[in-house]
Image (tube, helix red, strand yellow):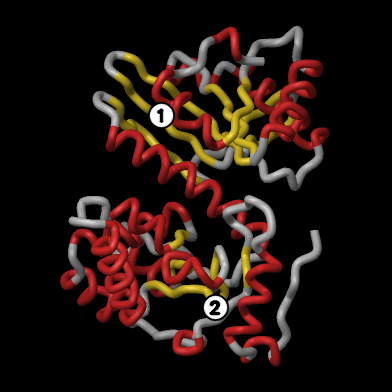
Amino acid sequence: MRIYRPNRRDRYKTIASAGKLAKLFNKGNDYYRISTVLKPSEARYMAIRLSQSRLEQLHDSLSLKDKEILDSLSRCRYLMTGQIQRLHFYDSKSIKAARAATTRTMRRLRATGLVSSFERKIGGVRAGSASYVWHLTEGGMRFINLKDAFDEPRRRFIEPSYAFMRHTLSVAECYVRIVELCRNTKDLSITEVQFEPECWRQYIYSGKRISLNPDLFIATQSGEYEDRWFIEVDLSTESPATVIYKCQRYHYYYRTSREQKANNIFPITLWIVPDIKRKEKLEAKIKNEFRNQTKLFRVITMDELDDIIVNGCDPGTLY
């Protein structure tokens, strides 16, 4: 896929020109296409250096909601304003009030130097402030680990590639949707959630050390039943052969019985794909490759996620 990369001159084009770029990047139904559109008043922010004493002051002065937002950014890496709104301002009187409160809070947190937003936006010009992508600064990462018994090495923040951000935001969207679903469904709750790299599984198979790297692990409980899920977000950027290779690693891990010994069951792996065409293609490949092996997988679109989480997977629908 060709990605338009603006040069220095492009950064100061008029809003009219930026609108043309937005149309270029928003063809099709991909919600996470990135357009490099700048809001002039927010084009540049100087990094704020935060001392240890200043971090401790912020820890005492920030509200509980502020800290919850920072924790969500630490887990998800990147979140759009709209996703932060859905996670933390769902109890506002109206959507308009929630949007205003989210924008106000994020600007205040940015002023502290704990968070920052990218110069580029998701969704084009019309998406407004809800499309800004937020992340922790280096100071924000230190703030999260402030009360840890040991200090983690400082990490220099590097702006991610288009593909990485698009994928990470898609994984975050899965998490946000499940949180909303549990909030609105009686007797449904999240009992455990692990993001990368916490959700990765290291194991030894046939004398080789192997790393299984799902995008997300989540456990949900409905009444007396608990469902456990490995989630893989597929954006049609990898070949079916690559998907099959990763599926084989799930089978290797299944045969170690490590997950079953710890939790009595092995999680179902959900491959979440962007459209029906991709779904049918991966289904056929997986069924053909693993037709005589344990059924571990289900390929779905994002629209099917809610029903799967609420009602679980019928074993007959796995492959």
Q: Secondary structure at mark 2?
A: strand
Query: Is residue 147 something that shows in the picture?
Result: no
Nearer to us in this view, 241 or 124:
124
Relative placement, left or right, of 26 versus 227 is right
Q: Secondary structure at mark 1?
A: strand
Identify the residue shown where x is 44% and y is 14%.
264
Quadrant where the image shows the N terminus? bottom right
Which numbered mark, 2 or 1, is in the foreground of this view?
2
Evaluate whether residue 187 shows in this view: yes
Amino acid type shown at disc 2: Glu
Q: Out of 249 and 123, give the one closest to the viewer.
A: 123
Q: Quadrant of residue 249?
A: top right
**Residue 69, image x, y percentages:** 32, 60
Disc number for residue 219: 1
Residue count near mark 2 (Cα–Cα under 10 Å), binned few <14, some 14–19, many ≥20: some
> Residue 201's spot in the image, x, y percent?
57, 34
Residue with the mark numbered 2: 119
| Picture coordinates of residue 178, whole percent (x, y) | 40, 37
How far from the left and from the top, in percent, is residue 49?
39, 85
Question: Which disc number belongs to residue 264?
Answer: none
